[in-house]
Image (tube, rainbow, N blue to C red):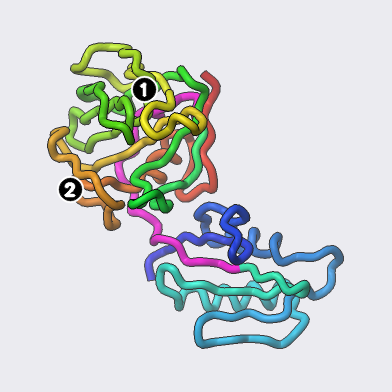
Amino acid sequence: MAIALFRVGIVDSDKDFTERLELEDALSSMHRLIRRRGNGPYAARIRRRGHTWSPRRLDGAAIEQKVREWLPTLDVGGVVAVRRSDGGVVIIRVAKPKPEPRVAFDRVPVPCGGYQDGWGAPRSGHDHQGIDIFALAGSPITAPFDGTLRFSFRGTSAGWAADIVAADGRGIVRNFHCQKTRIRPDGPVKSGDQCANVGNTGNALHTPAHSHFEFHAKLRSFDAVVSGNVAKEPCSSDGTACDPFAELNAAYGKIGGGTRGRGRPC
């Protein structure tokens, strides 16, 4: 089985789920959600599809041993459920396999932005094709690599967009919901050059200001970009969007599948 990432939380409560985690962090989150006050046994049953392990009053070590044993047997989307003594259920869901390392962005796209892993989240009629980087309206959006800028209105959904195609062919990034104000003319940009300002144009009018950040790998032309549902992993050159979470973590100084990237002060 490929090295996987995991999501941990209280069943039927998405707001209580962690983001994608490495195994050790996932187990730590599991214990935190299962644990009750005191040092005694704190879970009643562990289950995965087709199997239940239910001697009562399990301690933390027994729970962790069984979860470690079962997780590698699950496909992506599989769940191990742990029933707490109070009746609540904590689940660990197998997330997408850990992405293969790809060339990191040279610079961060929004120097003072903060983001979470929202790739593939349900949207009206489609899945989310990027990661939202939140920042104060007017914050700078910068080129993550040397390339060519195109600033244009992309419709009532995306609003104003700053699209940049890399000079070395590594791909295209798109920043949606920008403010309408043009910062620089279309044409060559260097890594770190300001290309636009964070805004809430398009369908982001009633949300906090942010840049919807997309990455389309291995493309050399704006015309090659394909819109639609999220791309299959790993990234290909078919024009669809790739999950940029790993690249953003690297650019913001994070490692692998960290739970959250935070922007740096402008």
Mark 2 is surrounded, within 10 Å at the Cα level, by few (under 14), some (14 to 19) or many (20 or more) other residues, namely some
Q: Is residue 14 left or right of residue 96?
A: right
Q: Nearer the viewer, residue 142 or 191?
A: 142
Q: Which residue is mark 2?
A: 237
Q: Is residue 23 above or below residue 45?
A: above
Query: Which residue is rendered at x = 51% and y = 66% of the image?
Result: 93
Q: Is residue 184 left or right of residue 142?
A: left
The residue segment tinted magenta is: 91-113
Q: Is residue 38 above or below residue 72?
A: above
Q: Position of residue 50 (x, y in %)?
A: 51, 87
Looking at the image, residue 193 lies above or below residue 101: above
Q: Position of residue 149 (x, y in %)?
A: 23, 22
Residue closest to the eye, 33 or 87 = 87
Q: Quadrant of residue 214?
A: top left
User: Which one is nearer the viewer's eye here, 133 or 204?
Assistant: 204
Residue 265 falls in which quadrant of the image? Answer: top right
- Along the line of sight, which residue is nearer the eye, 104 or 18? 18
Look at label 1 and name its amino acid.
Thr
Name which residue type carries label 2. Ser
Element at label 2 = loop
The residue that appears at 29% across and 33% down in the rendered structure is 174
What is the magenta segment's predominant secondary structure?
A: loop
Q: The N terminus lies in which quarter of the figure? A: bottom left
Residue 258 vertical position relative to residue 250 in the rendered view, above or below? below
Return the x and y of residue 88 as percentages of the image width and height. Answer: 70, 70
The CA span between labels 1 and 2 is: 24 Å
Q: Is residue 173 left or right of residue 254?
A: left
Find out whether residue 39 is within the magenta segment: no
Q: Residues within 10 Å of mark 1 (few under 14, many from 20)?
A: many
* Between discs 1 and 2, the one toward the N terminus: 1
Q: Secondary structure at mark 1?
A: strand
Q: Which residue is mark 1?
A: 142
